[in-house]
Image: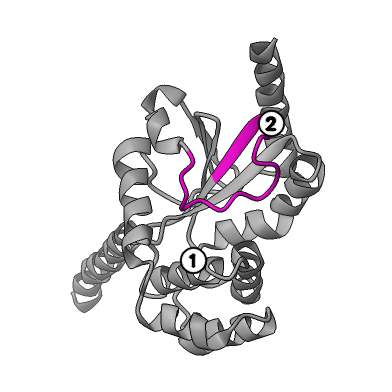
Amino acid sequence: MKKDYLLPVSILVAAVLIAGAVIYSAGTTPAPSPAGQQQPSAAVDANALKLTSDDVVLGDLNAPVTLIEYGDYQCTFCGRFFSETESQIVNNYVKTGKVRLVFRNFPFLGPESAPSANAAECAKDQGKFWEYHDALFTAEVKDGQENNGNLTRGLFMSLASNLGLDTTQFGSCLDSNKYASLVASQKSTAISSLGVQATPTFFLGTQKIEGALPYDQFKTDIDQALAAATTTAQ
């Protein structure tokens, strides 16, 4: 009788544990799978994709195609895109004047996300946004983990020093949280006007692409966008 009684109890306990794991998983906000998925452009408000003075463009300002990334410096999939794909896009399309690249903030993974975004924006004040962007991702992807406590003021200051920034000016910007409103606004607009729900999310023109897609997929989409831009220009 004791064994018969313990069997259903053990099953119940296991069910509770599994349910708890599911609830915990659902309570986090995971990035998309590396395979990613494309969304119809009809859901995109094109006005929200217009470049502003807050955007730092990598590449030719007059490039025919724009690629905007919404990312979180803690996001492991953003790190994968940075490590495996971004450099190929830069070498083959940005440096050749075909694509201009823009990074916008979508901090949503934890308490280190917004300060990291603020730090990168502070580097923008000294003309080193993209260098700092690269340094942040390089530092974060080493362990491939989120919310591990490594994105600290000490790291931010160290990266600024390594890049030759005026650390006094940078530290003042950092401590005043100068760009908090901009960072929050970029995230809010991405949600309300562009339907962004996870990182990385990209916009190639008005085409939404979710996930750290491999370079070959981006190449196909970029080539199509360039062909369309050429046809429109004619």
In-image side of 214 versus 20 (left or right): right
Real-space Cα separation, disc 1 to disc 2, in angstroms: 27 Å
Q: Residue at x 32, y 59 (%)?
A: 184
Q: Residue at x 74, y 43 (%)?
A: 94
**Along the polypeptide, which appears first: circle 1 or circle 2?**
1
Q: Which mark is residue 121?
A: 1
Judge the density around disc 1: few (<14), some (14-19), many (≥20) Cα neighbours within 10 Å.
many
Q: Residue at x 39, y 69 (%)?
A: 114
Residue toward you, 5 or 30: 30
Residue toward you, 84 or 44: 44
Q: Which segment did they paint magenta? A: 51-68
Q: Main secondary structure of the magenta part?
A: loop
Work out which quarter of the rendered image holds the N terminus and state it: bottom left
Relative image position of residue 77 (x, y in whole percent): 57, 57
Dot 1: element: helix
Q: Which mark is residue 222?
A: 2
Kindly identify the amino acid type of the residue bearing the numbered disc 1: Glu
Residue toward you, 53 or 215: 53
Q: Is residue 150 visible?
A: no
Relative image position of residue 50 (x, y in whole percent): 46, 36
Q: Compared with residue 151, is residue 204 higher up or lower down, i.e. above or below? A: above
Kindly identify the amino acid type of the residue bearing the numbered disc 2: Ile
